[in-house]
Image (tube, rainbow, N blue to C red):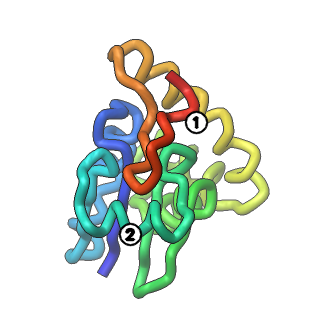
């Protein structure tokens, strides 16, 4: 079972998750919008995972966050198109994923700003998202 917790309001995140076609390849994939107040989302915030700084991918009980999560997804994705292959070759390698991930976070912030949205707020604390 694979669980992916990501920002459902981010068009880039949503497109990336959809493009991976993990359901076709792996079957049981649970997609969770980090903007929901689900018990699962609250539990990861409570464990100290900052969902505004990165998605979470849980594979067979192992939690991957941020760049590591993106790297795991890239490794599992299909390589059907040139774009898929480029993404796979960049994001599936640890050092490259760690270098590219901050740029992806900036792109997410810009995409959210263009949509008039803010970052994710931690539902466990009263702190507003760090970037508005």
- Determine crowd level at label 2: few under 14, some 14-19, many 20+ residues with C-alpha closer than 10 A: some
Please identify the quarter of the rendering in which residue 24 is found. bottom left
Q: Kindly give the residue lying farthest to the bottom in the view shown.
A: 60
Where residue 111 appears, x then y in whole percent?
A: 43, 22
**In the image, is 1 to the left or to the right of 114?**
left
Answer above or below: position of 118 versus 89: above
Mark 1 and mark 2: Cα distance apart in space:
22 Å
Q: Residue at x 44, y 17 (%)?
A: 113
**Closer to the camera in the image, 130 or 25:** 130
Q: Which mark is residue 105?
A: 1
Q: Is residue 34 above or below residue 121?
A: below
The residue that label 2 is drawn on is 43
Image coordinates of residue 129 in percent, x first then y, are 49, 35
Front-most of 86 and 53? 53
Q: Position of residue 9 (x, y in %)?
A: 30, 34
Quarter-wise, where is residue 44 in the image? bottom left
| Mark 1 element type | helix
């Amino acid at each position: 079972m694979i669980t992916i917790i990501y920002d459902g309001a981010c068009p880039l995140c949503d497109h990336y998750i959809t493009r991976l076609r993990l359901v076709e390849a792996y079957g049981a994939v649970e997609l969770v919008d980090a903007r929901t107040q689900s018990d699962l989302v609250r539990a990861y915030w409570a464990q100290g995972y900052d969902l505004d700084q990165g998605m979470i991918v849980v594979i067979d009980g192992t939690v991957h966050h941020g760049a590591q999560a993106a790297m795991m997804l890239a490794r599992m994705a299909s390589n059907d198109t040139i774009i898929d292959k480029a993404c796979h070759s960049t994001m599936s390698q640890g050092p490259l994923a760690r270098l590219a991930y901050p740029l992806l976070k900036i792109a997410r912030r810009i995409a959210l700003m263009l949509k008039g949205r803010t970052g994710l707020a931690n539902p466990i604390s009263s702190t507003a998202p760090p970037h508005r």
